[in-house]
Amino acid sequence: METCPVEKTGRTVDPDGAKIRQLRMAKGLDAQTMADRAGFNVKTWSRIEEGRPCFICTVVAAAKALGRTVKVEDLLLGVAPPPMEKADRIVITRRGEFADLDETELVAFAEAIEKLIGAKYKIEVVKVEPGSIRITIKLHPDDAERFRGAARRGLLDQLDIIDAKDVAGPGEMRREELIAPDEPGEVPARRSSADKIKGDE
């Protein structure tokens, strides 16, 4: 039977909400200010102070907002899940404003992708960027192929995904493969992920 580390650990971690709140109050700052510093909305900050499960990338952003001396592991109850041993990373660009996306919506979005592609394992959100919502997800290689297949069939529009690109992991050659259609119904020309992009030479 196939196993995958993320299947056993789940997609979220448990933040030490009391400690996060204590560190914020010691700085004399309100939740809105800290949320702005972390780059997400105040609803998400409130959730982590309540100790609600969240993505590890949310705790990383909170630690940076709280100061350079704060370590991510100090803001967690228990230990962080081990990294997925085999994983592909895909950067998704989604319609919408960053302020409209909170932790609950991120979980729902990951679950929606899993349902759409028929994922065998849980999808992990590892980074969220402001602006046109850019979300980096980590998938088991089998599910990454399912995602690419869904992109080729033009199914990503159902989730308001307007672009998706493969990216390299640590120690891997950089990849920039457009896997989402440029226009509805259009299948983009794909390049091998083993090919170097221009400028890599």
Image: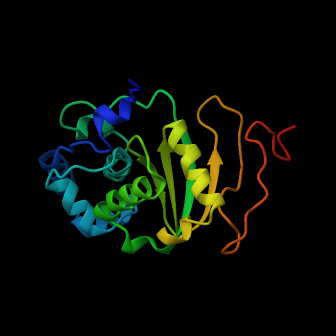
The quadrant in which the C terminus is found is top right
**Relative to 103, does residue 69 appear above or below in the rendering?**
above
Relative to 32, 192 lies left or right: right
One can see residue 28 in this view = no
Residue at 17 percent across and 43 percent down: it is 16
Residue at 79 percent across and 57 percent down: it is 189
Residue at 82 percent across and 40 percent down: it is 200
Residue 74, x across and y down, in percent: 24, 35
Specify the quadrant of the image occupied by residue 180.
Answer: bottom right
**Relative to 83, does residue 127 appear above or below in the rendering?**
below
Relative to 55, 88 lies left or right: right
Residue 63, x across and y down, in percent: 33, 46
Residue at 40 percent across and 40 percent down: it is 121
42 or 112: nearer the eye? Answer: 112
Residue 152, x across and y down, in percent: 66, 59
Relative to 126, 49 lies left or right: left
One can see residue 17 in this view = yes
